[in-house]
Amino acid sequence: MTTATPNRTDTTASRPIGSDRTSSMRAIVQQSYGSAESLELRTVDQPTVGADEVLIEVQAAGVDRGTWHLMTGTPYLIRVAGYGLTRPKQPIPGLDVAGRVVAIGSGVTRFAPGDEVFGIASGSLAEYATAHEDKLARKPHNTTFEQAAVVAVSGITALQALTDVGQLQPGQTVLIVGASGGVGTYAVQLAKALGAEVTGVASTGKLDLVRSLGADHVVDYTREDLVDTVHRYDLILDIGGRNKISRLRRGLTPTGTLVIVGGEDGGRWTGGVGRQLRAMLLSPFVGQRLTTFISKEHHSFMERVAEFIESGAVTPSIGHRFDLDHVGDAIRQMEAGTLRGKAVVDVGGSGADHPD
């Protein structure tokens, strides 16, 4: 799971540059942990900008699995981690963001009002949101705001899983389990750009998407085993999966690497942490490297992904478009696993679709 730093209020910051506003905005709000039904569209005050923060006029926001975890408050470990024991500390959900800078705190040096940015914000499902300047990068010149809004959380997770953690080298073989999801669609494209031979695992209706992203081979997990007796991979990314470690190890070369990216197989207390811990405890006793990680939210990773996008090697994959009135539908579709790519919320008013 990828999460953002809990929201905080900086009462000592000087007045932000570029804004004297105390006006209101529309925002998705939740007063308690729960399902998508706990979300309401309300009119609230615009957020206050801290000294090292940027105020963004949100044009679009992405919907990712981390947003779902923070909405439901599960696994319970995230509550202990500082996001609120009985209700969310940040009542406005949303992490992925793209928009224009309208004000900056007194300590901000990387941005100015008018800059077009993307990244990870605090409460992006609103007309205005704040973000720490270290969690923002300049929007790639060849993307729309909607495309940029689905990049940060999933893109940097895929990049780190492949490179910093997976240590992927040109010519290696990689199996991506969950290739049609938010992280997976970036992982397929990035792995190809890095010179790997890519096999993507998805359900029947999503195989064409995975092929279109550049996968050399696809596996339909509803009809065939993702691990067979023939193919072995230098690197396996198991994204949000429920596969047993022993099963995944059978698909690795004797010195291959397994990277567990999140996981939804555990209970309400720990989520997928148990499987990840078991993998790391086993790793020192086998020839294969079994590992996991927590994505680092920093602009340097966003800028690396942006370079791939600007070169044309990576294109953000958007499944459906929604507006603020239908955020609940986006989250329900993600929870049901029916989205292809990522869902984006059109906040700036450029048009969105939603289920009838």
Image (cartoon, helix red, strand yellow):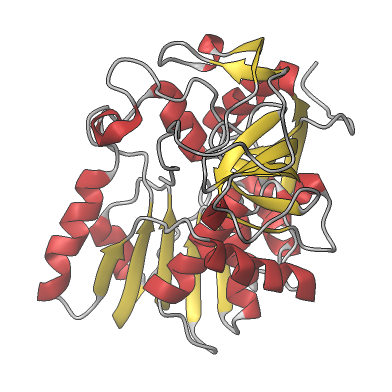
Q: Residue at x 43, y 15 (%)?
A: 34
Instruction: Tell me if 339 is positioned left or right of 99 in this view.
Output: left
Tell me: residue 318, above or below residue 261: above
Instruction: Give coordinates of residue 242: x percent, y percent.
Output: 35, 45
Tell me the quarter of the picture where residue 214 sits: bottom right
Q: Residue at x 49, y 85 (%)?
A: 172
Where's the N terminus, which quadrant? top left
The residue most toward the right is 350
Instruction: Give coordinates of residue 107: x percent, y percent.
Output: 54, 52
- Depth check: give the residue in front, 50 or 303: 50
- Depth check: give the residue in front, 3 or 154: 3
Instruction: Tell me if 167 is positioned left or right of 249 in this view.
Output: right
Tell me: residue 78, above or below residue 4: above
Tell me: residue 196, above or below residue 119: below
Q: Residue at x 59, y 62 (%)?
A: 302
The residue most toward the left is 285
- Depth check: give the residue in front, 44 or 40: 44
